[in-house]
Image: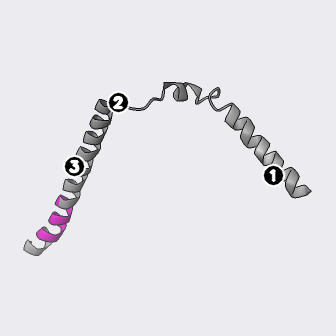
Amino acid sequence: MKAEARAEGIQGSFESKARNLGRGKYGRIFKMAHTPTREEYKKTCYIAALGMVVLGAVGFAIMWIMTYLPNHF
């Protein structure tokens, strides 16, 4: 019996939070959220890919400097 009461309390707490999900401090964010258009998605993918390329290039340059320079000086 005690386990049932605890489970019911947990479920009740979860349901009350779920009911108020769109009204609390995150309500405005949920109302503004939307599925991105194809153009927005393309821009996001482009920027993410560009960031990965830049970080990869910086990492490669650092690796090359750390392996090449100590052997020649």
Taking the spot 64% from the left edge, 26% from the top edge, the residue there is 23
Foreground disc of the pair 3, 2: 2
Foreground disc of the pair 3, 1: 1
Q: Position of residue 15 (x, y in %)?
A: 73, 39
Q: Quadrant of the N terminus?
A: bottom right
Which secondary structure dominates the residues rendered in magenta? helix
Q: Are marks 3 and 1 in contact (CB under 8 Å)?
A: no
Q: Earlier in the sequence, mark 3 or mark 2?
A: 2
Q: Quadrant of the C terminus?
A: bottom left
Q: Earlier in the sequence, mark 3 or mark 1?
A: 1
Q: Position of residue 29 (x, y in %)?
A: 52, 28
Taking the spot 12% from the left edge, 69% from the top edge, the residue there is 68
Q: Nearer the viewer, residue 28 or 1?
A: 1
**Residue type highlighted by circle 3:** Val
Q: CA distance from mark 3 to mark 1?
A: 50 Å
Residue at the left extreme, as displayed? 72
Across the whole image, how many numbered discs are drawn on residues?
A: 3
Q: Nearer the viewer, residue 52 or 16?
A: 16
Question: How many C-alpha atoms fall within 10 Å of the one at disc 1: few (<14), some, or many (≥20)?
Answer: few
Element on which disc 2 rests: loop
Taking the spot 29% from the left edge, 44% from the top edge, the residue there is 48
Left or right of 4, for residue 25: left
- Magenta region: 61-68
Where does label 2 land, which residue?
37
Q: CA distance from mark 3 to mark 2?
A: 26 Å
Where does label 3 land, which residue?
54
Taking the spot 35% from the left edge, 30% from the top edge, the residue there is 37
Left or right of 2, for residue 73: left
Question: How many C-alpha atoms fall within 10 Å of the one at disc 3: few (<14), some, or many (≥20)?
Answer: few
**Residue type highlighted by circle 1:** Ala
Picture disc at residue 7: 1
Element on which disc 3 rests: helix
